[in-house]
Image: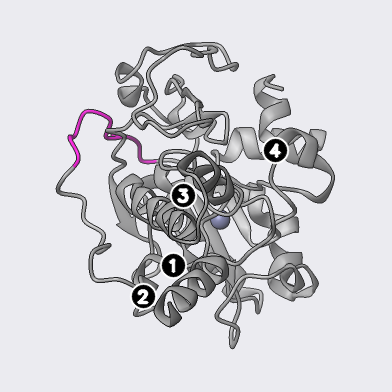
Amino acid sequence: MKKMGALILLMLLFSSCGAVTAIPEVPITMTTTSTTTTTMTTATTAAIITISTGAATTTGAAAAVSGSTTTRKPPNNAGSAYAYDYPGISPAVAAVPADPYLILVSRDYALPANYTPALRVCVESYPEKIQMESTAAKQYKAMYDAAKADGAELIPYSGYRSIERQKGNFERLVQTNVDRGHSYAEAVNLAAQVILPPGCSEHSAGLAMDITRPGVWDTSVSFESTKEFTWLQAHGHEYGFILRYPKDKFSLTQITYEPWHWRYVGVGPATAMKSSGQCLEEYLGVG
Ligand code: ZN
């Protein structure tokens, strides 16, 4: 039971993004069990995003996965099969839009089970080798270099996480809750309050980065008072990144304020959202 207690503590401390409470996230490289080593070899390649040499130029190769759309608003796929069977958990399966960088991934929209972005290390000089989707990673590096020239160091803390890894984290917490005496349905419900179910984290799309700064290996709201955050607020959109979960958008995002979590959407959409003050849900006309 002591070991289980430690596991619970670890899960609470290192939950995945999208928790209803602002709990720090664990990078892939900090995995706490031997069974969660991340690999890209098990998924099919059906949904690989193949794009792009520039931030604003994308093609819709990934749109073939589950039906493309040329509209901003993702179709309501309620009724589509979610790949997992958890009581009370039934997100629609997100269709990949024509611009795959605008995919909406949330508690309501899960990635297709075989969604496998092409990955690239963001900043090679760090030993953790944090990855994002290829174009997002290149844009992150450009942003990183520009920030560093201005005296701000945008250290990659947690980027891509596989759906399988998310599934493992989620189901371990469910099992922990069962072991503590909860029914399976209760255990799932409790787990979902701390860790987003598999497919529901935009980290699994390779389009989100949790950013930290020198000397601080964690994520916390205190990031908002750093020069790194100030720089991101002024310039992040120039590289296609948005503050995904702003303070005043909880009713739309269902995620509490996370100053460390930046989402790549492309330069054009990021600039438009910066100008309008819209969050992604508003920009897409959802919610
Ligand atoms: Zn995050």
Front position among marks 4 and 2 = 4
Q: Main secondary structure of the magenta part?
A: loop
Report the mark closest to the observer, 3 or 2: 3
Disc 3 vs disc 1: Cβ atoms closer than 8 Å? no
Q: Which residue is mark 3?
A: 203
Work out whether mark 3 precedes mark 4 in sequence or the reverse, and give the earlier one: 3
Q: Which residues are magenta?
A: 43-53
The residue lying furthest to the bottom in this view is 215
Label at residue 27? 1
Location of mark 2 (residue): 128
Which amino acid does the dot numbered 3 rest on? His
Q: Amino acid at mark 1?
A: Pro
| Badge 4 or badge 1: first in the primary sequence | 1
Which of the pair 109/91 is nearer the observer?
Answer: 91
**Inter-mark Cα distance, 3 to 2:** 16 Å
Question: How far is the residue under mark 4 from the one under mark 1?
Answer: 22 Å
Q: How many C-alpha atoms fall within 10 Å of the one at disc 3: few (<14), some, or many (≥20)? A: many
Callout 1: 10 Å neighbours few (<14), some, many (20+)?
A: many
User: How much space separates mark 3 and mark 4, taking CA atoms?
Assistant: 15 Å
- Is any part of residue 9 visible from this angle? yes
